[in-house]
Image (spheres, rainbow, N blue to C red):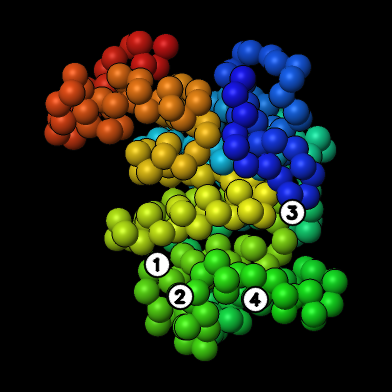
Amino acid sequence: MPAAADTDRNTGEAAVTPPPAGVTDSTVPAPILRVNNIEVVYSHVILVLKGVSLSVPKGGIVALLGANGAGKTTTLKAISNLLHAERGEVTKGSILFEGEEVHSRSPSDLVTRGCIQVMEGRRCFAHLTVEENLLTGAFTRKDGKAAVAADLDLVYSYFPRIKERRKALAGYTSGGEQQMTAVGRALMSRPKMILLDEPSMGLAPQIVEEIFEIVKNLNGKEGVSFLLAEQNTNMALKYASYGYILENGRVVMDGEAKSLRENEDVKEFYLGVAEGKRKSFRDVKHYKRRKRWLA
């Protein structure tokens, strides 16, 4: 099993991609996150996730891919325990963060433990300045103002654009600046892992590339693990080391990012390319009727 080039500066462990589903490898270290066969039900009736399993290695970047409505956001909310606000619950399976079951933990407790979610749509506090938004991310910390100030400078070093805009109201900044603010706010909590939901949504391609480069740097230099829920399959697989593809609440395929990029089904269903030719979305939609994809 090949290892990623980057290492976690806190533990010194190599960032190793997880083995494929159903394969065990004694050389792979325990993952920072393991989701085991979970089912999620909304309003006691609607079954959304149907036996989803995945893992995220320490210091790794893992992509959770799929079309809109496949269950990506629900998976992240199940991990961060945000389902109850939407009348959802995990009815089966287990979720372990750093080897400990966290299903019964509160969202704030998970943040304190180092697992934080950056919500879809950025969710900045529009009436606060950019810097005030960043400081809300340090609300749970108890290590003093000096440490918080040092981390604020660190965030600005990764996001020089929002340093220039730090006194502006977040609601009046661009979509890209709001996304940077949201990721920076998460960094202020000193996370071990960030659940990043649709970071490319509504952003220009150049800004998307810039944000993913920052994610790569945070992963390599700060040792932060990432689980990316993303519809932009091409971009996600460019930066992730491993990927899982969700379809109708189930994991239908997983593997190393390189193998997924080269897979003919992934090319056809998600990249719009088949036999070297680009196909229209209408032509690609026939995958829903192909039994071998959902088998």
Q: CA distance from mark 3 to mark 2?
A: 26 Å
* CB contact under 8 Å: marks 3 and 2: no
Q: Secondary structure at mark 2?
A: helix
The residue wearing badge 3 is 114
Q: Nearer the viewer, residue 12 or 261?
A: 12
Residue 7 at what x, y percent from top left? 68, 42
Residue at the spot 53% in from the left edge and 76% down from the top edge:
125
Sequence-first tag of 2 and 1: 2
Q: Secondary structure at mark 1?
A: helix
Sequence-first tag of 1 and 4: 4
Q: CA distance from mark 1 to mark 3?
A: 25 Å
The residue wearing badge 2 is 161
The residue wearing badge 4 is 153
Quarter of the image with the N terminus is top right
Q: Quadrant of residue 56?
A: top right
Sequence-first tag of 1 and 3: 3
